[in-house]
């Protein structure tokens, strides 16, 4: 599906027809299965997210979208993943797709031709199992020097992982830990020596947990001492996915705010005729289009390349804050009703704010961009 190579995006970009067909299928599914007008409270949303995951993984194959065909996946790439992210972002859809099919799966794929990864990937691609990537610890920094989890005798892990996305539902954890050869990745299954403590979250559609490892049995995956490059590849893919998802959410907010501004009458006129509302809507539109350009360009770069790192950093730095501001603006346009459970706007705001803490944030991405500029990447 994604035959266009890095560097070929010049001038006007016209997506391939099959991409538009894929987008249409996803749009139809989300509009019928995740109706924003219902705006369920968190407890009601949980069952719907599980049902949606079964459809996305079983019927559409999104769980294995970027997994090679030899491992039971679709063999596609980030352009297709970005389309899926954008459409799911329009619906603020939850579930384990981001944690399992993006972060954990991309980390496993980056370990190379590894027998342990090859054993796990088919189940993840089919959606029969879900995984979570456990990296961050008490420093809350996505940096190798912040990892204190250690590997003992017989590959037993000891340490505490904080803010692990999707850990509460995961069948397997991809854990970054430090051993004699340096930082490596390990597979850990919930059970003996593994305590998963769910946390209260602002965005109830994505679970976060603390994972305590006490001599937890583990299996090494990938080459010893080469775990961090795999984490970096997962972060790169995650940044692209989140940026595209945030563009979808921003577009949905812009559409809803524009419609409301044209139909809500105040002082005998639609509120959209007032200058303050017009300017707010225009700002929302500009931010959304800039985000779409950044996310699309990043998605079409060769994974792991200099342009891919650059694109992911730009997209993450812009889209995360643009989405949050667009969510705040949409609530202002809708007035006080937008913050109630009966209206969907607050769900976007919760997701936008929570997204700032899921991966390295905009400030860290800007520092990364500064270093890239200094080295000419």
Image (cartoon, grey):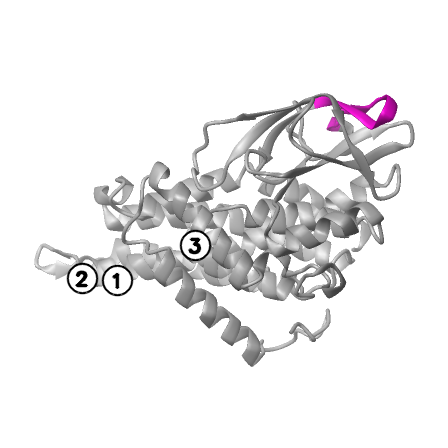
State the residue in front, 6 or 329.
6
Residue in the picture at 47% in, 61% down: 87
Q: CA distance from mark 2 to mark 3?
A: 21 Å
Between discs 2 and 3, the one toward the N terminus: 3
Question: Residue 328: which quarter of the image?
Answer: top left
**Residue at image mark 3:** 249
What is the span of residues highlighted in magenta in the rendered image? 146-159
Residue in the picture at 60% in, 65% down: 80
| Residue 221 seen in the current view | yes
- Residue 111 sits above or below residue 13 on the image: above
Q: Position of residue 304 (x, y in %)?
A: 77, 55
Q: Are marks 2 and 1 in contact (CB under 8 Å)?
A: yes
Q: Position of residue 354 (x, y in %)?
A: 48, 38
Label 1 sits on a secondary structure element that is helix
Residue in the picture at 71% in, 58% down: 308
Residue 263: numbered disc:
2
Residue in the picture at 83% in, 33% down: 183
Label 3 sits on a secondary structure element that is helix
């Amino acid at each position: 599906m994604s035959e266009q190579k890095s560097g070929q995006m010049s001038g006007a970009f016209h997506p391939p027809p099959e991409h538009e067909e894929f987008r249409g299928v996803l749009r139809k599914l989300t509009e019928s299965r995740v109706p924003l007008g219902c705006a369920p409270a968190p407890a009601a949303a949980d069952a719907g997210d599980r049902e949606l995951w079964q459809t996305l993984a079983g019927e559409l194959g999104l769980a294995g979208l970027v997994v090679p065909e030899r491992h039971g996946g679709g063999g596609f790439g980030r352009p297709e993943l970005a389309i899926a992210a954008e459409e799911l972002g329009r619906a603020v859809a939850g579930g384990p797709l981001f944690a399992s099919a993006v972060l954990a799966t991309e980390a496993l794929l980056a370990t190379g031709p590894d027998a342990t990864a090859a054993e796990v990937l088919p189940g993840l691609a089919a959606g029969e199992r879900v995984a979570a990537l456990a990296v961050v610890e008490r420093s809350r920094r996505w940096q190798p020097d912040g990892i204190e989890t250690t590997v003992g005798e017989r590959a037993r892990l000891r340490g505490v992982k904080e803010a692990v996305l999707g850990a509460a539902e995961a069948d397997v954890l991809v854990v970054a830990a430090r051993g004699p050869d340096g930082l490596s990745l390990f597979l850990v299954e919930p059970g003996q020596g593994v305590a998963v403590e769910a946390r209260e979250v602002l965005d109830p559609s994505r679970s976060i947990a603390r994972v305590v490892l006490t001599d937890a049995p583990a299996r090494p995956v990938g080459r010893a001492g080469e775990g961090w490059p795999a984490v970096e590849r997962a972060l790169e893919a995650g940044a692209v996915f989140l940026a595209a998802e945030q563009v979808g959410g921003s577009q949905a907010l812009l559409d809803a705010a524009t419609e409301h501004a044209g139909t809500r009458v105040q002082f005998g006129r639609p509120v959209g005729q007032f200058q303050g509302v017009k300017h707010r809507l225009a700002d929302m539109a500009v931010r959304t289009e800039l985000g779409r350009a950044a996310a699309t360009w990043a998605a079409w770069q060769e994974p792991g390349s200099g342009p891919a790192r650059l694109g992911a950093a730009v997209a993450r730095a812009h889209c995360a804050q643009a989405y949050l501001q667009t969510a705040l603006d949409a609530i202002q346009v809708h007035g006080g009703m937008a913050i109630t459970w009966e209206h969907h706007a607050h769900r976007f705001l919760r997701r936008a704010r929570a997204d700032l803490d899921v991966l390295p944030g905009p400030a860290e991405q800007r520092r990364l961009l500064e270093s890239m500029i200094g080295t000419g990447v």
